Amino acid sequence: MPPAASPRPGRILDPTKRAAILEGARAVFMREGFAQGSMDAVAAEAGVGKQTIYRHFRSKEALVEALVEAMCAPEVVRPPTRSLPAGQRLRELLLAFVTGAASPDSVRLYRAIVAEADRMPGLGRLFWEAGPRQVRAAIAQLWAEEHDTATAPIVAEQLVQLALGDAYQELVLGTGSPKPEVFERQIDAALTLLEVASRRRRR
């Protein structure tokens, strides 16, 4: 897939306007969905002309892809400082991850991507590469510092699923509003479970 936000060649573009467009797109698309949200609405929300949007993004699809990449903020998956033990850093990373994933905009983004899976299948791949894949890689890296490197990718997948748990499904489906403490308990239970399993394998 080509870069989502490639501007038209030969133009010097204002980065502040690009940021305003992305913020406008976030407001519109998270409120109305990718299919229903219009470029006119994005332009009005961003305070720019529609042609300005098209100077920064070739199409609505390109704008949507750029927004997905922007919302999968890399800060969320950066491992905490190395001055802490690996286990504590892993717990902090998981807490940061679920806090981001459970935020209202992140839940809306996930719903919107699922809703567009048939019409824009590349969007799901873009989301996976920009967010979930990087999260799993960061978790695997921390787990491997004190455990078996070979099993780290599998453990990372399990930790992500256990950390999100049923609480995340309730959020996505709109059937509940679990408090942050629920996710924290799920994370602690997951780390304890996998730590015990790891010790048994080493015996």
Image (cartoon, grey):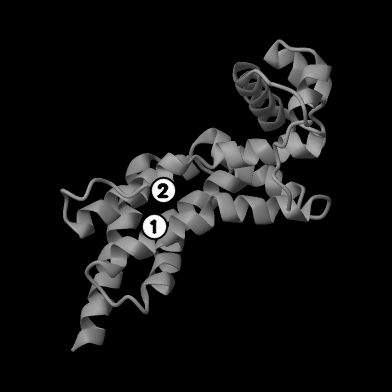
Quarter-wise, where is residue 90 in the image? bottom left
| Amino acid at the residue labelled 1 | Ala
The residue lying toward the viewer, choosing from 100 and 17, is 17
Quick one: label 1 or label 2, which is nearer the N terminus?
2
Quarter-wise, where is residue 70 in the image? top right
Query: Residue 146 placed where, x, y %?
Result: 22, 69
Tell me if 4 is positioned left or right of 76 in this view.
Answer: right
| Residue hosting label 2 | 77
Question: Looking at the rendering, in which quadrant would you find the C terminus?
Answer: bottom left
Query: Residue 65 placed where, x, y %?
Result: 70, 41
The residue lying toward the viewer, choosing from 156 and 142, is 142
Regarding residue 84, the answer to whether it shows in the image is yes
Regarding residue 178, the answer to whether it shows in the image is no
When the figure is inspected, residue 15 is found, relative to residue 72, above or below; the finding is above
Tell me if 87 is positioned left or right of 114 in this view.
Answer: left
Mark 1–mark 2 distance (CA, rounded to whole Å)? 6 Å
Kindly identify which numbered label has been placed on residue 138.
Answer: 1
Q: Residue furthest front?
A: 10
Tell me the element at label 1: helix
Tell me if 163 is positioned left or right of 177 in this view.
Answer: left
